[in-house]
Amino acid sequence: MRSRSNLFLIAILALISTPLVIMYVFQLIDSVSRPALGGFLPQTWELGNWRFLWETIDSARPSIWRVTFNTFVFAASTALLVCAFSITAAYALSRLNFPARRFFLAGLIMLHAFPTITLIIAIFIVLQFLGLYDSLIGVILVKAALELPFGIWIMKGFYDSVPWEIEMAGVQDGASRFRVWRELILPQVKPGLAALLIFSFLAGWSEFILPLVLAPGADAQVLATYMNAVIADDMRPDYGLFKAIGVFYALPVIAVYLLFQKQLMNIYGGGTKG
Amino acid sequence: MRIHLQNFKKTFGDTTVIEDMNLTVEDGEMIALLGPSGCGKSTTLFAISGIHKINGGTLHFGDKDVTNLPAQERSVGVVFQNYALYPHMSVAQNIGFPLKVQKLKTAEINARVGEIAELVQIGNLLDRKPMQLSGGQQQRVALARALIRKPDVLLLDEPLANLDAKLRLEMRSEIRRLQRETGITAILVTHDQIEAMSMCDRIALMKDGRIEQISTPTQMYESPASHYVASFLGNPPISFLQAKADASLDLGHGNALPLPIGKAVQGELTLGIRPEHFGPQHDGPKISGQISFIEPQGREDLIDVMLPCGQKLRAIAPSGHGLKLEQDISWGTQMDRLHIFGADGTRL
């Protein structure tokens, strides 16, 4: 009975996911083949679409490796910044009694739901003023700041689930509040931290709008804007090339998901408690 | 170390939980703070530990005023209800943590951890993680961690509440043994009267943020200061009967007890009769009624007797009594163990 209802569920899921699967399959097939004009079934198999890996696809653009390195720096720095601030800010919000704590909490929820794109002009002006416009550092700071409410909220959920008694015991054992946090509490929220690190890395990896608007130059290009440029510049867009870059761009994400599935699931486990 | 709490006051926001409380725990004594939940016993404990700030009054450890010392600088060991072991550390690291904080040398920490682990009999578990231990073993680790610093006072917050009945019995005597062997002053917070009576030298029974009575377990059981104290101690609990005193203690419908000798009592009163002082095996003035319930307990049976006036009296009868439900009985009462409470609840 149970296995039959499971089969039924699997059938429904399969049906719904089919369009997605088709998309992914053709993304992959088209990156290594050339369809007939106007058709979609592959005619000839070739690796020409992957030429961006070993040659610069046009003289004005940086090499793919430079762009990939940029993207990695962008995503990794964002993730590290978000984690560094989240683990401290969330602890304060969860455990410390300070003025305007409720205000910060409410602000956090509001920012969490805030459509960040409406801020883009203000951010543009601020970056311009600071001289960080069109630099990777500028985009990293902006992206990290925008990811923070989510990160703090998730980490607060994890801190909230650590028993108060552990903290009390630590204080009673003679340790300072800071030491208690670092040696006793932080290890308890490690799963959350790992999940947040991966999550914000992926968020940085897939970010498009912020680098597009705030760092349009060639030096600070990331994979998302690189792809955009490939398809936007040419009179006759090369979809095969575009799809090959797309696969290249998605590979690390898939790898991260496969490697860290368990850690990523944690974010749903501990992060729900307000 | 002698613990002295004077005019202690504790408020949370606008509500005063405890006001003007005095408590002295003698050196080497184990005392129980007993009371229902919300009576302020844990609050008192955490004020002594330093986790809660004291809003008024003073606290002395020996001659030293520790009222304004933070928890870290008070020499207090605490065992929490859920043990609060550090899940990511091994048993040895857990126990050694207070010494590590004091920056002792690793060799000395290891030596002292081994020593205290032997004392609480967990020497073979030092490499395990808390998750891999049973409740009783976790309890022992928590005790070892609290004791390793040789603190001035050991505080136990409902230490047995999370254990099953058999382990509870074992740990009860174990904690008492440790307290005796180390000679440490200890305060036990509990809502369980049996724990308080069996483990402690004295009991402070609390109600609504006040200490209702403080005395030895036997004293408290045999001469409770009030209706409340009498009702809190004893299992099965004491029965209370409304009575009117003039020429005798009249229970209505023909039941009456003689006036107690040497006590001037008058008017509406409450009588307290413990189950073990009423039953077929006792001499003394008779009370008649009908058996309404029999609860076999093995060694003895617990019997509820409905009096004609509609009040209920509980009795303990040795098993093999052959009594039946709804049987009419007339049993003796031990008059010298009868408690009489006035209208305000104090014992006369």
Image (cartoon, rainbow, N blue to C red):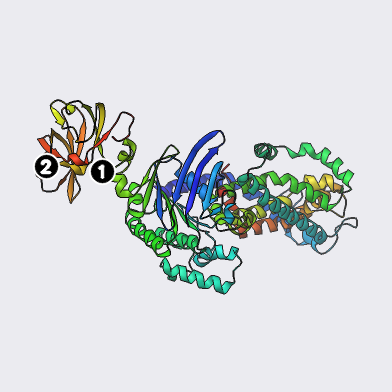
Q: Amino acid at mark 2?
A: Asp
Residue at point 17%, 31% (across, down): B307
Most extreme residue toward the bottom is B107
On residue B10, the disc is none
Q: Which residue is mark 2?
A: B283
Residue A128 % position (x, y): 88, 44
Disc 1 residue type?
Pro
Residue B143 image position (x, y, % from top left)? 45, 60
Viewer-nearest of discs 2 and 1:
2
Q: Indicate the quadrant containing the C terminus of chain A: top left, top right, bottom left or bottom right.
A: top right
Left or right: residue B234 versus residue B281 is: right
Whichever of labels 2 and 1 marks the residue nearer the N terminus, that label is: 1
Q: Is B170 situated left or right of B148 in this image?
A: left
Residue A76 in the image: above or below residue A15: below
Are labels 2 and 1 on one chain? yes
Toward which corner of the image does residue B277 lie, by quadrant?
top left
